[in-house]
Amino acid sequence: MSLDPAPLDAADPLAAFSEQFLAPDDFDVISYLDGNSLGRPLKATAALLASFVRDQWGGRLIRGWTDEWLEWPITLGDRLGRVALGAAAGQTVIADSTTVLIYKLARAAVDARPGRNRVVLDTDNFPTDRYVLEGIAAERGLELVWIETDPVTGIEPSQVAEVVDERTALVLFSHVAYRSGWLAAVPEITRIAHDAGALAMWDLCHSAGSVPIFLDKWGVDMAVGCTYKYLNGGPGAPAFAYLASHLLGSVRQPIWGWMGHRASFEMGPGYEPAAGSRALLSGTPPILAMVPLHANLDMLEEAGIGAVREKSLLLTGYALEIADEWLAPHGVEVVSPRDPARRGGHITLKRAGFDKLLDPLWERGVIPDYRRPDGLRIGPAPLSTSFAEVHRGLSVLRSLLEK
Ligand SMILES: *Cc1c(COP(=O)(O)O)cnc(C)c1O
């Protein structure tokens, strides 16, 4: 089997998008394989940030708030909803961090289901999701119901069906498992939760910008995700929250701040939530950190999430072929789904001793993601990564394993 990346790159309809990024050749990076942790910056982002500081911050000063900054959490949220989440306008905001938004929505969900005292989650969900739910359970006297997920695959509808019942207020899972890359059956699991009268919340951190999402069609109640992974928002860029329109009036998030108030600048005596998705906001929006999203959403809209997904599957499929041919003989195991229908945007390789290879890989300009104790995640971002880049990175890994 040929592992030559040239024909794959030649046939790639998205190849030209890599030119929109600050070029890898400008730096000491020969292979960046961690788009699922921190996306690369666009050239347009560098320009937008510079002009924002000069013209908008410097020139408009506080007038910028009423020019448009106060609307950004809503307008950018709606745009993200349309381009990447399958969400009609009025349900998505950009705000806070994923962690904080999980708290706000999960608390809102359990408060909206009085008399139900259980929250269902899985043992392999991302730590922050688990910790926040532990905190809410302690705060509200709830019981956490843990589903043991297989770390090589992920959450299955049948596992959810076994544990949800009339005591369940909320289920929370990740669309793409951060370790294995397992792509959960969101519509089925959501339906199972609904049949038991529970609300369903999804963490989209590892799928937004990589896997097509249809929140409205799937009937999802709540979703959160970050914008600094496949959405290239930059380190610590704010997160997004989706609350289905049928819940907007009746579900109330617990951090009542002035920016979620009906009339923020009346400075009134008591909290009255704003109508619609603005009620999800709490404090002053992180405007500077939202600037890159404008450029990223332009790019994603132009490329189309469907085409991004097609390339993503080809990239991870290619990485799997290389792993089988070059790395398996050195004891490397693939601990991710091989079925494209169940595979997210990254794969994980496992071998004892990977921790000792991280420094030599970085020294050689190869940057995968490392998960303790023995996992290397390969997350090639489709818009910035070529097949040649995957080939280069994994051939350096092979040569280190040969030593
Ligand atoms: C990256 C990630 C997070 C990160 O949350 P922060 O609040 O941005 O630190 C949360 N959940 C999942 C599934 C993630 O992959």
Image: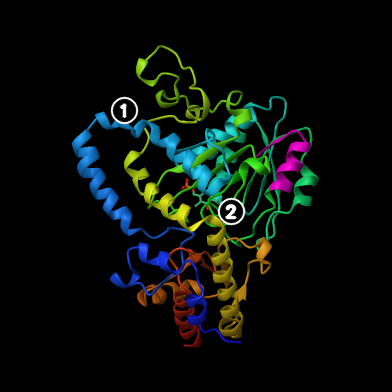
The residue that label 2 is drawn on is 212
Quick check: 179 above or below 121?
Answer: below
Asked whether residue 189 is drawn in magenta, I would say yes
- Please, what is the three-letter code of the amino acid marked with disc 1? Thr
What count of labels does the image hold? 2
The picture quadrant where one finds residue 306 is bottom right
What scheme was used to colour the molecule? Answer: rainbow
The answer for how far apart the CA atoms under marks 2 and 1 are is 34 Å
Q: Left of 290 or right of it: where is 180?
A: right
What segment is highlighted magenta in the picture? 187-201
Of helix, strand and loop, which one carries label 1? Answer: helix
- Please, what is the three-letter code of the amino acid marked with disc 2? Pro
Is the CB of the residue bearing disc 1 within 8 angstroms of ligand 1?
no
For the residue carrying disc 1, how many other residues have a C-alpha within 10 Å: few (<14), some (14-19), or many (20+)? few
- The residue drawn where x is 63% and y is 40% is 216
Of helix, strand and loop, which one carries label 2? Answer: loop
For the residue carrying disc 2, how many other residues have a C-alpha within 10 Å: few (<14), some (14-19), or many (20+)? some
Give coordinates of residue 328: x percent, y percent. Answer: 60, 82
Query: Can you name the residue that lies furthest to the top here?
Result: 269
Say which of 172 and 330 sits in front. Answer: 172
* Mark with earlier residue (2, 1): 1
Q: Left of 171 or right of it: where is 393?
A: left
Quick check: 160 above or below 315?
Answer: above
Find residue 66 and name its label: 1
Give coordinates of residue 316: x percent, y percent. Answer: 57, 70
- Give the prevailing secondary structure in the magenta stretch: helix
The answer to whether residue 96 shows anywhere in this view is no
Give coordinates of residue 119: x percent, y percent. Answer: 68, 38
Q: Quadrant of the N terminus?
A: bottom right
Say which of 61 and 163 sits in front. Answer: 61
